[in-house]
Amino acid sequence: MPGSQNGRIPKLADAAGTDGDALAADPLPPHPLLSLLPPGTLQRLLANGAVAEHKKGSVVFRADTECDALFLILSGRCESRREGGVTEIFGPGDLLGARALLNREPHASTAVVITHAVLLRIPAAELTGLFATDPCFAGRFSQAVIPGSDTQA
């Protein structure tokens, strides 16, 4: 199975983003999704500034907007909000936007940062490109991000 450093992602040398091309050796905790990415994909995402800090109160995406990316929470917490209030709280290792991405539908809720957070943004175009070129990746991806998907046809 393709892998990116056994599912670990390197920290940016400067979390503020002033030296986004430099990578430090100190890895963040592993995530099953990262181990699925083909070699070079994660490094390309990091080099293009895919890791970003978000202040408390910032909106990651809004309900009823097109899903243009999947977000992996590296640190901090986010919450999912609908008209009725908070529906779910997410922390390190959780994904934001997976349901909308996989179903090719707008976001059902608004994702808001509730503590300072660092997120890895994986563009939808990057993932759909991988799905198109490697059909097995699509199946492995679904199993990694959807609980119980390994039993679905």
Image (cartoon, rainbow, N blue to C red):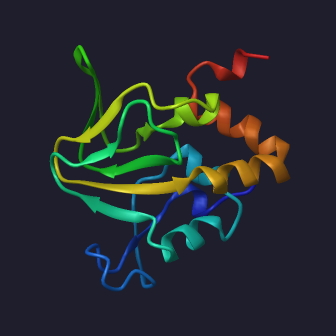
Residue 139 lies, in percent from the top left, at 75, 35
Residue under the image location 28 percent in, 73 percent down: 15
Residue 70 lies, in percent from the top left, at 50, 46
- On the picture, is 13 further left or further right than 140? left
Q: Nearer the viewer, residue 126 or 117?
A: 126
Q: Nearer the viewer, residue 116 or 63?
A: 63
- On the picture, is 127 further left or further right than 93? right
Residue 44 lies, in percent from the top left, at 59, 72
Residue under the image location 58 percent in, 46 percent down: 33
Position of residue 25 relative to residue 50, above or below, is below
Image quadrant in which the C terminus is located:
top right
Residue under the image location 45 percent in, 37 percent down: 65
* Occupied quadrant, residue 140: top right
Residue 121 lies, in percent from the top left, at 46, 56
- On the picture, is 128 further left or further right than 90? right
Residue under the image location 76 percent in, 45 percent down: 137
